[in-house]
Image (spheres, grey):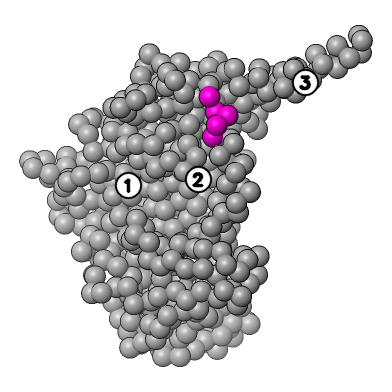
């Protein structure tokens, strides 16, 4: 009996450590259970959002979940949640399949809709935006006085931002700043964020990235970032005379980034830039990985158009801060005249990439520390590699004189084409959902084969165009061939949309019936914040 009691005591202590508390949040104006600062976080007496996001670690800590219930949360919010338990996260998520929208279009002096000063917190499955009418013009008199970001993550390592939609914010989409190493940004849609400066130029990046940690890597993975008013992703610092370095240890993996700058009516700009503007060689972009990304700017490939400014990837910026230890591997880089620019790079690996560009624009050369190989270049002229105002190289002379790209190929831009299916990525956090990226130079529909993804015949699906996400583009049922046709002619003359040669789609397959039953059971069991653990514990004991 004594051994049994000891065993039960041990089990009880272990379960206390891993116990998960569940808290609930509702909008303040909810008709039945409005959230309140006087609530206790239970389903019957929920918190409002700001109260939930301001809880101390004595109340909400690692392994706990804060459920956001359906509705529009009007306001600008500050999150100071912190998990003090190593490797355990607080989760802030939409409840079940509820549509949760944080609307920052309110009177406020805060410079972002969601400000995060948190450690080990997961934010997932909700939207951050501005609803209703508002000006995009920075104007001290009648317009915006300053841009307002979607999310600014200011302090706190090892947070995760998953399956968020960050869009239509009049400013930066997502700022992930230097004191937030170890952050993961995955499967997010970041689009149509930004403003117009008083001069009429576009401002507001999709994602602005920094990192001062020597041990924690910043990762952006599987995101879709498009149609922001300025650059897509800036791994960057504009500080000219830094005392320390804070643009390092960043990985950009399997993102789709396109048409950056397009909404501003000014010009298309970099989908990715990796650099700093430091003048003293202190804050140098280093240890950066750019791999498996698809970068695109509107270009009429059918008519072999290549003129015009449309940079897709820029490496380096100022000669005082040449990048170090940067890897660019297995990317598709499509633009126009200067789609690929290498400004100042001390050590650079550039391998297995496909590039469509007027030429490869080089500001400087450091071939003794560069590794270029297995690339496929499509350029306007045979002298594909151009060093500013000095030299131009064909691939053959580039190989012989500079000793780079031994196994690479060059072809005329007129011969450019790609496999029609550029990417199929299953959402790690929503296994029935897939991102599909397709290309067709002739602007014809693309048939995609899902036979390798174990999707059964007779399963229903919903297809959405990422640029018109709220509308269901197509519904259907899988056939024995597992092939589904994706339509390409969706532009309809819209100057702010991709041309009909490129498309990014989200396709969601019907969940298995057994899984739906499990989820319904889980919904019924979420009835409070603390007693759930004790009920589970006593059930475990057999009572």
Magenta part mainly helix, strand or loop? Answer: helix
Q: Which residue is mark 2?
A: 162
Mark 3, mark 2: which one is toward the viewer?
3
Q: Are marks 3 and 1 in contact (CB under 8 Å)?
A: no
Image location (x, y in percent) of residue 168: 28, 49
Q: Residue at x 65, y 32 (%)?
A: 87
Q: Which residue is mark 1?
A: 172
Seen from this angle, which residue lies furthest top? Answer: 2
- Magenta range is 523-527
Mark 2, secondary structure of its residue: strand
Depicted 40 relative to depicted 105: above or below:
above
| Alpha carbons under labels 3 and 1: distance apart | 54 Å
Picture quarter with the C terminus: top right
Q: Residue at x 49, y 18 (%)?
A: 56
| Alpha carbons under labels 3 and 2: distance apart | 37 Å
Image location (x, y in percent) of residue 368: 60, 69
526 part of magenta stretch: yes
User: Is any atom of residue 237 visible in this view?
Assistant: no
Number of numbered markers = 3
Horizontal relation, residue 230 to residue 2: left or right: left
Residue 537 or 206: which is nearer the viewer?
A: 537
Q: Which residue is mark 3?
A: 542
Mark 3, secondary structure of its residue: loop
Residue 508 or 137: which is nearer the viewer?
A: 508
Mark 3, mark 1: which one is toward the viewer?
3
| Alpha carbons under labels 1 and 2: distance apart | 18 Å
């Amino acid at each position: 009996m004594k051994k049994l009691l000891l065993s039960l005591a041990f089990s009880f202590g272990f379960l206390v450590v891993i116990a998960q508390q569940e808290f609930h949040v509702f909008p303040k104006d909810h008709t039945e259970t409005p959230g309140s600062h006087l609530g206790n976080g239970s389903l019957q007496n929920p918190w409002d959002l700001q109260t939930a996001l301001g809880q101390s670690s004595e109340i909400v800590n690692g392994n706990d979940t804060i459920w956001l219930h359906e509705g529009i949360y009007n306001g600008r919010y500050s999150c100071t949640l912190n998990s003090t338990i190593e490797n355990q996260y607080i989760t802030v998520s939409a409840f079940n399949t509820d549509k949760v929208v944080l609307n920052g279009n309110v009177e406020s002096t805060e410079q972002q809709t969601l400000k995060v000063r948190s450690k080990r917190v997961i934010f997932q499955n909700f939207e951050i935006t501005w609803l209703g009418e508002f000006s995009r013009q920075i104007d001290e008199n009648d317009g915006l006085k300053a841009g307002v970001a979607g999310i600014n993550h200011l302090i706190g390592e090892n947070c995760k931002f998953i399956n968020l939609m960050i869009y239509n914010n009049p400013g930066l989409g997502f700022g992930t700043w230097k004191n937030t190493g170890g952050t993961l940004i995955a499967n997010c849609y970041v689009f149509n964020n930004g403003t117009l400066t008083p001069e009429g130029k576009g401002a507001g990046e999709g994602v602005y990235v920094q990192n001062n940690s020597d041990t924690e890597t910043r990762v952006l993975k599987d995101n879709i970032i498009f149609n922001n008013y300025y650059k897509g992703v800036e791994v960057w610092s504009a500080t000219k005379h830094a005392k320390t370095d804070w643009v390092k240890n960043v990985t950009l993996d399997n993102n789709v980034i396109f048409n950056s700058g397009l909404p501003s009516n000014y010009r298309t700009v970099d989908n990715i830039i990796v650099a700093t503007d430091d003048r003293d060689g202190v804050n140098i972009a280093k240890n950066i990985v750019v791999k498996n990304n698809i970068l695109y700017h509107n270009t009429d490939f059918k008519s072999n158009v290549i003129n015009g400014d449309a940079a897709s990837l820029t490496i380096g910026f100022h000669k005082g801060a040449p990048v170090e230890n940067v890897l660019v591997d297995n990317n598709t880089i499509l633009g126009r005249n200067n789609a690929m620019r290498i400004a100042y790079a001390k050590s650079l690996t550039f391998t297995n990439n496909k590039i469509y560009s007027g030429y490869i624009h080089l500001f400087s050369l450091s071939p003794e520390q560069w590794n270029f190989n297995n690339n496929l270049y499509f350029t306007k002229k045979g002298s594909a590699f151009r060093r500013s105002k000095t030299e131009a190289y064909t691939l053959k002379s580039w190989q012989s004189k500079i000793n780079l790209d031994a196994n690479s190929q060059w072809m005329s831009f007129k011969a450019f084409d790609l496999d029609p299916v550029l990417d199929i990525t299953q959402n790690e956090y929503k296994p029935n959902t897939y991102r599909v990226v397709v290309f067709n130079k002739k602007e014809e529909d693309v048939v995609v084969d899902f036979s390798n993804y174990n999707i059964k015949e007779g399963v229903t699906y919903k297809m959405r165009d990422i640029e018109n996400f709220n509308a269901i583009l197509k519904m259907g049922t899988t056939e024995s061939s597992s092939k589904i046709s994706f339509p390409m002619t969706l532009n309809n003359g819209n100057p702010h949309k991709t041309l009909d040669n490129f498309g990014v789609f989200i396709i969601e397959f019907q969940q298995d019936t057994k899984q739906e039953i499990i989820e319904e059971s889980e919904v019924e069991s979420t009835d409070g914040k603390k007693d759930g653990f004790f009920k589970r514990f006593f059930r475990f004991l057999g009572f």
